Image: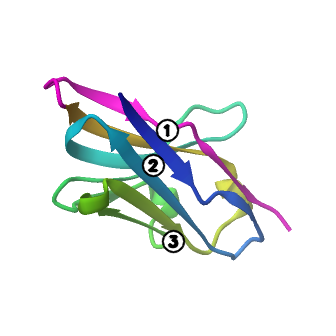
Amino acid sequence: QVQLVESGGGLVQPGGSLRLSCAASGSIFRIYDMGWYRQAPGKQRDLVASITSTDKTNYADSVKGRFTISRDNARNTVYLQMNSLKVEDTAVYYCNADLQNLRGLRSNYWGQGTQVTGSS
């Protein structure tokens, strides 16, 4: 069993900051790419940022310069530092991990999601 547990969401004023965390646990052999996606009401789930096991990062154009993704491989944890938040960043944020379990099976796993709301 593998679980991804997110934390750190909440309500923030425009211009404010939040830091999301996602910890992977369970029968993990190796984690490859990790990432954050978001889904606003009535819209599809889109990539926000991703990071490889060697710390190569990729960002959606809409968050470049404002969000920073990082990971702690020793803790199987990925972070998303969100600065200069905008109302349009409001969404449920989902953690994703491409990993191999102890049985050798490689799959994508998702967290349960955490709500981020930018509102004055």
Query: If the image is split into quadrants, where does the C terminus sit?
Result: bottom right
| Secondary structure of the residue carrying numbered label 3 | loop
| Type of the residue with mark 2 | Trp
| The quadrant where residue 113 appears | top right
**Cα distance in 3D space between marks 3 and 1:** 23 Å
Q: Is residue 103 magenta?
A: yes
Report the magenta residues as a range: 102-120
| The quadrant where residue 45 appears | top right
Other-residue count near label 2 (Cα within 10 Å), few / some / many at <14 / 14–19 / ≥20: many
Residue drawn at (42%, 36%) of the image: 3
> Residue 66 shows which numbered tag?
3
Apparent side of residue 96 relative to residue 32 in the rendered image (left or right): right
- Where in the figure is residue 18, as x and y percent of width and height? 61, 68
| Secondary structure of the residue carrying numbered label 1 | loop
Residue drawn at (68%, 75%) of the image: 16
> Residue 111 shows which numbered tag?
1
Q: Nearer the viewer, mark 2 or mark 1?
A: 1
> Residue 57 shows which numbered tag?
none
Q: Is residue 4 above or below residue 57?
A: above
Q: Is residue 117 magenta?
A: yes
Apparent side of residue 112 relative to residue 11 in the rendered image (left or right): left
Which sits in the foreground, 25 or 106? 25
- Where in the figure is residue 104, as x and y percent of width and height? 13, 26
Q: Nearer the viewer, mark 2 or mark 3?
A: 2
Apparent side of residue 94 relative to residue 51 in the rendered image (left or right): right
Residue drawn at (74%, 60%) of the image: 87
- Where in the figure is residue 72, as x and y percent of width and height? 30, 63
Disc nearer the start of the sequence (2/3):
2
Pointer 2 residue = 36
Disc nearer the start of the sequence (3/1):
3
| Type of the residue with mark 1 | Gly
Which sits in the foreground, 71 or 41? 71
